[in-house]
Image (spheres, grey):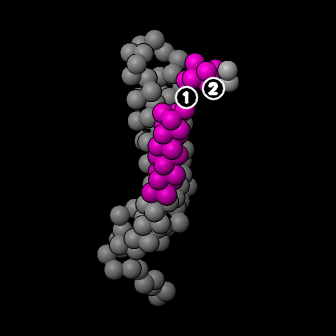
Amino acid sequence: MSEQLLPQGAGPGADAQRHGNHGSYIYGFAAALLLTAASFWAASSNLVYGPSVPVLLGVLAIAQMGVHVVFFFHISSAPDQTNNFMSLAFGVFVVGLTIFGSLIIMANLNHMMPTMEQLLERQR
């Protein structure tokens, strides 16, 4: 009678789901392979409208990140996953802040850079 105590709101099999089982890894691996193949197909196919290829690749990349978060990181909406979800959200915030801040700085530097003609005039 070795009954495990599960967190409040956790259903049966929650412990196996938290640490993953072979089936979830296989489903995740198959989904990741499918999304990777779809990305390569979209990039090399003429069936997709040319200017929409970057948008499609972005959507497929976000879907693949979702597959990794759910099937490999095992982050879900369960009550005991709050800290894991918050740390993931904070990490995404910091990375986004770094990337967009760098883009803003580079755009400002590009705007303030003098043209080649202005540089040549200064040298004379």
Residue beneath the point at 44% across and 34% down: 58
Q: Which amino acid does label 2 sit on?
A: Arg
Q: Which amino acid does label 1 sit on?
A: Pro
The answer to which of 110 and 96 lies nearer the viewer is: 110
Q: Residues within 10 Å of mark 2 (few under 14, many from 20)?
A: few
Residue stretch rendered in magenta on the structure? 93-122
Residue 110 in the image: x percent, y percent? 52, 33
Residue 117 in the image: x percent, y percent? 58, 18
Residue at the extreme bottom of the image, as rendered: 1
Residue 122 in the image: x percent, y percent? 63, 26
Pointer 2 residue? 122
Q: How far apart are marks 2 and 1 (CA)?
A: 10 Å
Question: Which secondary structure, mark 2?
Answer: helix
- Relative to 117, 50 lies left or right: left
Residue beneath the point at 67% across and 20% down: 124
Which label was assigned to residue 114?
1
Which label was assigned to residue 102?
none
Residue beneath the point at 43% across and 42% down: 62
